[in-house]
């Protein structure tokens, strides 16, 4: 089993090749290195029992700074038919979002309606960008924009976000499945059909009803996301973003139990970082978030998950100073 893990120690490293940028990516690349308060996190991806890796993950700490407010960006993408759309989303979606936010949102008048406007526009532009990629490739998307006062979760497809609040698993997204009553009505209203072929599928082909790409299935499969804006409270513990390789075999409640035990130190895996006295607390906290992500993947594999699996754990009760570019 191949693991690709990351934690807060990578927040000073550019994890994307932005050499082919347009104006919106330059908004990021022009920024000087600066010290910000980063959200403690960890992420892990595995190819699992698939022959190819089609998942992708984005972590952009301090990707947006407005009026002394810092926002972190976390994204999980589950490709199908190939990896190209998922990788394009990994490299580009946060860039497009920065541009939309800079143009549309007044930080003093933020609202759920404003966030919905910029997210829908951003996802629509991302869908247009991948139009030249082979028509039968697509990707689901779930992203979280985490600020000091709020968490904005946006999903398109069946990747999922779950928040643990005061010990209770709170769903922060709704899976876009073809047999969801409102999705079924929309698909049939557009002239499409949902056919049960190893589960309900759009035209008997795709098991999700919304995605980026998949142009051969339009207008039945659409890129319009759904957005949930949640004001942060002291009861918020952590956020889990993951592809359906996890959620197909692990419930929201069990996932939160595992992460909580890891963050509390009750589940301990071998630390891969080198601990030194001056950074001991920092390394342990970042490691616990990454270890929690890895523990979820191990559980999913043990339960027979047959898909690629990608997990991001965002520890909302822990922050630290880090340098971003």
Image: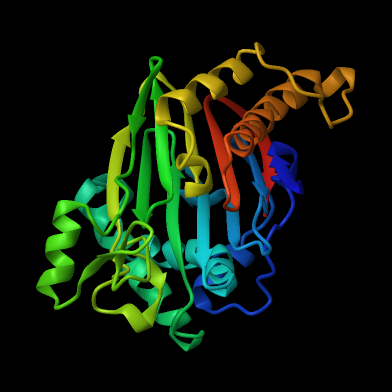
Q: Which residue sits at x=61%, y=13%?
A: 264
The structure's colour scheme is rainbow
**Which one is in front, 200 or 138?**
200
Q: For this view, does 287 lie left or right of residue 108? A: right
Looking at the rendered image, the quarter that the C terminus falls into is: bottom right
Q: Which residue sits at x=51%, y=59%?
A: 78
Q: How many marks?
A: 0
Residue 179 is at least partly visible in this image: yes
**Which one is in front, 156 or 277?**
156
Q: Which image quadrant for residue 58?
A: bottom right
Residue 30 is at least partly visible in this image: no
Task: Give residue 274's position: percent from left, percent from top.
Answer: 89, 29
Task: Give residue 3's position: percent from left, percent from top.
Answer: 74, 46
Task: Give residue 147's position: percent from left, percent from top.
Answer: 44, 39
Task: Give residue 135's position: percent from left, percent from top.
Answer: 44, 84
**Which one is in front, 78 or 62?**
78
The answer to whether 200 is drawn above or below residue 148 in the figure is below
The answer to whether 73 is drawn above or below residue 218 in the figure is above
The residue furthest bottom is 132
Q: For this view, does 23 lie left or right of residue 214? A: right
Q: Which residue sits at x=59%, y=70%?
A: 83
């Amino acid at each position: 089993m191949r693991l690709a893990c990351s934690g807060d120690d990578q927040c000073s490293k550019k994890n994307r090749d932005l050499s082919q940028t347009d104006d919106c990516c330059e908004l990021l690349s022009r920024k000087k290195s600066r010290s910000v308060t980063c959200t403690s996190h960890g992420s892990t991806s595995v190819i699992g029992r698939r022959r190819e890796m089609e998942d992708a993950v984005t972590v952009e700490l301090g990707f947006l700074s407005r009026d002394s407010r810092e926002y972190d960006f976390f994204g999980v993408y589950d490709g199908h038919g190939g990896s190209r759309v998922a990788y394009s989303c990994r490299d580009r979606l946060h860039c497009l979002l920065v541009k939309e936010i800079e143009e549309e949102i007044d930080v003093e008048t933020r609202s759920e309606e404003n966030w919905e406007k910029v997210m829908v526009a951003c996802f629509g532009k991302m869908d247009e960008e991948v139009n030249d990629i082979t028509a039968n490739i697509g990707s689901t998307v779930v992203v979280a924009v985490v600020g000091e006062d709020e968490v904005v979760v946006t999903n398109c497809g069946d990747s999922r976000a779950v928040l643990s609040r005061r010990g209770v698993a709170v769903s922060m997204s709704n899976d876009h499945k073809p047999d969801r009553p409102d999705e079924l009505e929309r698909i049939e209203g557009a002239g499409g059909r949902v056919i049960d072929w190893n589960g309900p599928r759009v035209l008997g082909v795709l098991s999700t009803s919304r995605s980026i790409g998949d142009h051969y299935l339009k207008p039945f499969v659409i890129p319009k996301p759904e957005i949930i804006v949640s004001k942060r409270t002291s009861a918020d513990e952590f956020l889990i973003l993951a592809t359906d390789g996890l959620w197909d075999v692990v419930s929201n409640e069990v996932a939160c139990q595992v992460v909580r035990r890891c963050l509390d130190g009750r589940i301990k895996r071998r630390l891969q970082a080198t601990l030194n006295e001056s950074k001991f607390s920092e390394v342990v906290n970042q490691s616990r978030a990454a270890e929690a992500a890895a523990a979820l993947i191990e559980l999913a594999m043990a339960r027979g998950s047959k898909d690629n699996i990608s997990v991001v754990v965002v520890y909302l009760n822990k922050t630290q100073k880090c340098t971003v570019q």
